[in-house]
Amino acid sequence: MWLIYLILFIFNNMKQCFSYRKQCWLVFFSFGFMAGFGQLRAQESHPPDLHATVQSYLKQGDYANALLVLNNALKEDPRNLELLKDQAFTYYLQKKYEQSAAVGRKLLENKEADVKAYQIAALPYKATENMRELDRIYKKGLKAFPNSGVLHNEYGEVLWTKQNPDAIVHWEKGIEAEPNYPGNYYNAAKYYYHSRDKVWSLIYGELFINMESYTTRTVEMKNILLASYKKFFTDTDNDLFVNDKNSFVKAYVADLQKQASLASRGINPESLIMIRTRFILDWYERNFSSFPFRLFEYHQQLLKEGLFEAYNQWLFGSTQDLTAFQVWINGHAEEYQRFLDFQKGRVFKMPSNHYYNN
């Protein structure tokens, strides 16, 4: 509409333009600028519109139409990173791995290649279990993005398919570099649970649950967390920590072992509530100034809000005994709802300086 008014303005004032050249040039300059601006806006909105169209086709499983749109768009803009990512991913979904890999190579040749580009370029090689190419892609990606928790996590998963112990090195680097990406906690907790270690599966498992609270992986991790507490109090190799050089681990084990008598009748939600409550009280009395830790801060916050019991029931109740958990909810409906509202009203974030596994 503004363009029509501007044209009419120029036409009606053409005579004045010959008399007042400066004003005329301003009018034509304004016209050219606004027209160019409109064209630029149209160009800027083009890729998102295309992406939405392609995603719509992919959701329908209509890969042919998705590629039709992408191939036509790439004729006009063959180096467009977003279009290439969509094209490589579409070929991958079609199980046309050679075509997907070929587009992936174009992606990584692009100077603007981002983390997502490396993830997509790796997909066809994961499908064909080409470890050599996966190794090359992730090493290149981590050289470009050394603080990418996503790339450290995925490379760790690739290494672990061959039982390569360097997997945990990458999961730990991912936790340290990007502490709010949950995937590395998930894999590290599982790794440590199946090792001799009895500390980091407890810590990483609970951190993961607070970052990713309502997925199938959450259910799996709740089981691992409960089993990790049983492992801590039933295994007799606690001398494992005597010579540990990690001061945080020594302090953690010492305060948790002090609660061993509370575990004498078994590990269940009720005993864990007592164990974990006393642990937090001891930690804040002796160790918090040396080792501030967001997870323990959250525990203390829940204690002050009167929600720590509900939180522990949410963590361990359904895993230990679903029927007993439902009975507890029925008797504490208001308290449990307050906890759920509290939990959903916040995002759990780990500070970058709360990393102690080094």
Image: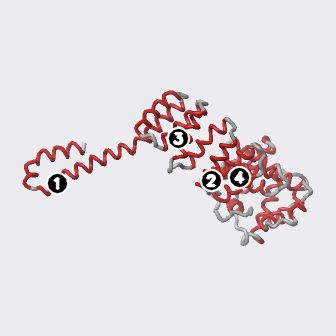
Please indicate whether residue 39 sits to the left or right of residue 326 in the image.
left
- According to the image, label 1 marks what residue? 25
Task: Check the image and report above or below for 70 versus 181.
Answer: above
Which residue bears the numbered disc 4?
A: 185
How far apart are labels 2 and 3 at the CA level? 19 Å
Closer to the eye: label 4 or 3: 3
Of mark 1 and mark 4, the one earlier in the sequence is 1
Q: Amino acid at mark 4?
A: Tyr
Q: Earlier in the sequence, mark 2 or mark 3?
A: 3
Residue 39 at what x, y percent from top left? 32, 44
- Ranked by sequence position, the earlier of labels 1 and 3 is 1
The residue identified by callout 3 is 85
Q: CA distance from mark 2 to mark 1?
A: 53 Å
Label 3: how many residues lie within 10 Å, few (<14), some (14-19) or many (20+)? Answer: many
Q: Identify the mark at residue 142; answer none if there is no mark.
A: 2
Q: Is residue 152 left or right of residue 46?
A: right
Which secondary structure lies at badge 4? helix
Distance from label 4 to label 3 (Cα)? 28 Å
Q: Secondary structure at mark 1?
A: helix
Q: How many marks?
A: 4
Q: Contact (CB < 8 A) between labels 2 and 3?
A: no
Q: Amino acid at mark 3?
A: Lys
Q: Earlier in the sequence, mark 2 or mark 1?
A: 1
Looking at the figure, which quarter contains the C terminus? bottom right
Check the picture and name the quadrant holding the N terminus: top left
| Closer to viewer: mark 4 or mark 2 | 2
Q: In the rendered structure, are the residues bearing label 1 and label 3 in contact, judged by CB atoms less than 8 Å apart? A: no
Whether label 4 touches label 3, CB < 8 Å: no
- Towards the viewer: 335 or 219: 219
